[in-house]
Amino acid sequence: MTEPARPQMNAFRHALRLLAALLVVVCLVPGAVRADQPTRSYTISPNERIHVIQRKVDLLKGRFELTLYPISAQLNSRWTEHLGLGLAAAYYLTETFGLQIFGGDNLYVAQETSLQTELRKKAQLQPPSAPSILTQWFAGAAMEVSPIYGKLAFYKEALLHFSLFISAGAGVVGTKVELIGPPPPEDPTARGPVFASAGLYGAGLVGAGFRVHLGQDWLLRVEVRDLIYSARITKLNGCTATDLGELAGPSPQVSPGCNVSAFDQQNLSTDAKLAEGRADGSSNTVNQVSTFIGFSYLF
């Protein structure tokens, strides 16, 4: 190697050494910085836990449900007031579809509103009987579909399963008409209330509500149902207006279908006269919208 080339080779080697030193520094400095940082704690507080994925559970499929509704109250009480209880039994073919039979009785309250009473007593007006017909009891069958269901976090780590459902069905209702209202507060000894049967009618039913699972077997149910039927008041206690006119007279001659024993025999003439005025042949489509609150048990 010639003398002029030797200094150039030395300079090239010196540059390589400097470059290698820089690379070592670049590689070691980030590691030193990371070593100075505190170790991350992976302890998660209960408030930060999120149940992202949970296997879908079948709580209803293939099971029977028995429901008691201790409260069923009419919501659209313009002409009538109803308060009763109900009972239902259902079988779920799938988690979202079930068949149900139901029944109820308005044994607590089934009467006309104070508006009807005031029109009759103070204004001497007799409203048509059909709009103020009273539902004494009802029974039928329905299907129930749950298009929306899910779960909610409750308290600490508990999960509440819920579902929103709609229902539709058909059945029969027993009806009656109020002849004499409850005794007024100023005269609690007055006679009343007095009713007369208005017969049986076929009815349709539509409803919606939600249920919440309180564990594996118990449920809370809240729903709204619309009981729909068409009524025409031509007979009371099986008696036509002609029969009722006869009962108000001294020597009644009535048709075979007239149930005379359904009237108070001590006030037969008075009640028959009142019933004659209520068997006015009026007709109306009744929509009795009620809320039902109850508890269920799954078998």
Image (tube, rainbow, N blue to C red):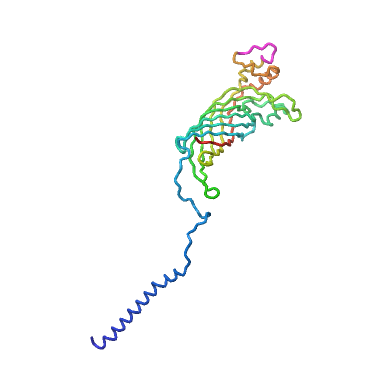
Of the 4 image quadrants, the one containing the N terminus is: bottom left
Residue 239 against residue 58 in the figure, above or below: above
Secondary structure mostly seen in magenta is: loop
Looking at the picture, how far across and down is residue 231, in whole percent? 58, 25
Q: Residue 81 is drawn in which quadrant?
A: top right
Q: Is residue 296 magenta?
A: no
Q: Residue furthest right?
A: 186
Left or right placement of residue 281 versus residue 145 in this view: right
Q: Position of residue 163 (x, y in %)?
A: 51, 41
Report how many numbered discs are placed on residues in the image: 0
In the image, 90 versus 267, the foreground residue is 90
Q: Residue 112's spot in the image, x, y percent?
A: 66, 29
Question: x and y percent of residue 122 in the render?
Answer: 73, 28
Task: Kindly indicate the quadrant of the structure image that contains residue 102.
Answer: top right
**Residue at 47% from the left image edge and 68% from the top image edge:** 37
Q: Which residues are magenta?
A: 246-255
Q: Is residue 59 above or below residue 102?
A: below
In the image, 157 versus 240, the foreground residue is: 157
Residue at the spot x=62%, y=19% of the render?
Answer: 237
Is residue 246 placed above or below 47 in the rendered structure? above
Residue occupying the far bottom of the picture: 3
Residue at 49% x, 39% y is: 146
Image vertical order of residue 75 relative to residue 279, above or below: below
Residue 247 located within the stretch drawn in magenta: yes
Is 193 left, or right, of 231 in this rendering?
Answer: right
Q: Nearer the viewer, residue 192 or 91?
A: 91
